[in-house]
Amino acid sequence: MAKTKKVSKPAKISNEELNKLQGVVNMINKSQMQIGVLQTNIHNLLHHVAGKNDELTIMQIDLEKEYGTTDINILDGSINYNETN
């Protein structure tokens, strides 16, 4: 019966491979962190826009009461009354 020769398996990858692997994983982690920061900024901006939309709605109600319309040129402030007003 023939004896089989055992092949030893390496215990570690090379330092070059380890450095490359660590670099790739670090870049993924950094990119994921940046995505998180961007998502937080988007979330905060959406809340800001929602608040400004509420503010605009209140202004439109006040303008409607005062002038009977909300059709106002935002460049010069002129009121555009329709024919029924």
Image (cartoon, rainbow, N blue to C red):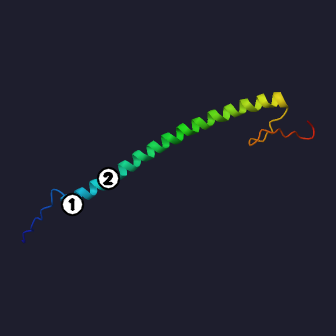
70 or 50, nearer to the observer? 70
Residue 63 occupies quadrant: top right
**Quadrant (top left, top right, bottom left, bottom right) of the C terminus:** top right
Residue 83 occupies quadrant: top right
Q: Which residue is mark 2?
A: 25
56 is higher (above) or lower (below) than 9: above
Residue sitting at x 18%, y 58% = 15
54 is higher (above) or lower (below) than 75: above
Left/right of residue 75 with respect to residue 18 in the rendered view:
right
Q: What is the distance, in whole Å, between disc 2 and disc 1 at their CAs?
A: 14 Å
Give the residue furthest to the front.
Answer: 76
Left/right of residue 36 with respect to residue 43 in the rendered view:
left
Q: Which residue is mark 1?
A: 16
Q: Where residue 51 sits: x, y (%)?
A: 62, 33
Q: Earlier in the sequence, mark 2 or mark 1?
A: 1
Give the class, few, some or many, for how many residues have Cα within 10 Å of label 1's Cα (few <14, many ≥20): few
Residue sitting at x 42%, y 46% = 34
Give the residue type that dot 1 points to. Answer: Glu
Left/right of residue 80 with respect to residue 31 in the rendered view:
right
Q: Where residue 24 sits: x, y (%)?
A: 32, 56
Q: Where residue 54 sits: x, y (%)?
A: 67, 32
Q: Where residue 16 sits: x, y (%)?
A: 21, 60
Give the residue type that dot 2 points to. Answer: Val
Residue sitting at x 15%, y 56% = 11
Residue sitting at x 48%, y 40% = 40
